[in-house]
Image (tube, rainbow, N blue to C red):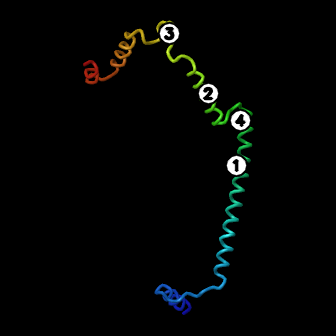
Amino acid sequence: SLFVLRATKDMGKMLGGEEEKDPDAAKKEEERQEALRQQEEERKAKHARMEAEREKVRQTIRDKYGLKKKEEKEAEEKAAMEQACEGSLTRPKKAIPRGCGDDDEEDEESILDTVLKFLPGPLQDMFKK
């Protein structure tokens, strides 16, 4: 009978009946919101402490093995690239040692022929045309 009474009360609310007004409802809601804010702040502080502790451990590992932070490594690579770009972008032909590539096309053909030997017959025919 208690269930039926409760159910009819809820049905009355759904149909637009008058809700029971709690005089302290606004105050309770305010306290609840404040408690939630406080919990969130505590959680963030806890995570910040944990992250700081992890960073200390990471730093000891970096020091032990001579590793660098990702940001430091990226900064060094960028500096190295800029330094390389300061000089001339084209170098004189004499600076290229003999046999280092672009003067002999025969090597490329022989490499292509070597690759073709390992391909099945129909594919070889396609590439030779």
Does the residue at mark 4 contact the one at mark 1 (Cβ under 8 Å)?
no
The residue that mark 4 highlights is 62
Q: Secondary structure at mark 2?
A: helix
Q: Residue at x 61, y 33 (%)?
A: 74
> Foreground: 61 or 104?
104
> Foreground: 9 or 120?
9
The CA distance from mark 4 to mark 1 is 16 Å
Earlier in the chain: of badge 1 and badge 2, it is 1
Earlier in the chain: of badge 4 and badge 2, it is 4
The residue that mark 2 highlights is 79
Please identify the quarter of the rendering in which residue 19 is found. bottom right
**Residue 99 appears at what percent x and percent y?**
46, 8
Q: Is residue 75 left or right of residue 52?
A: left
The residue that mark 1 highlights is 51
**Is residue 55 depicted above or below 96 in this figure?**
below
The residue that mark 3 highlights is 92
Q: Quadrant of the N terminus?
A: bottom right
Type of amino acid at the residue the image marks with label 2: Ala
**Is residue 94 depicted above or below 42 in this figure?**
above
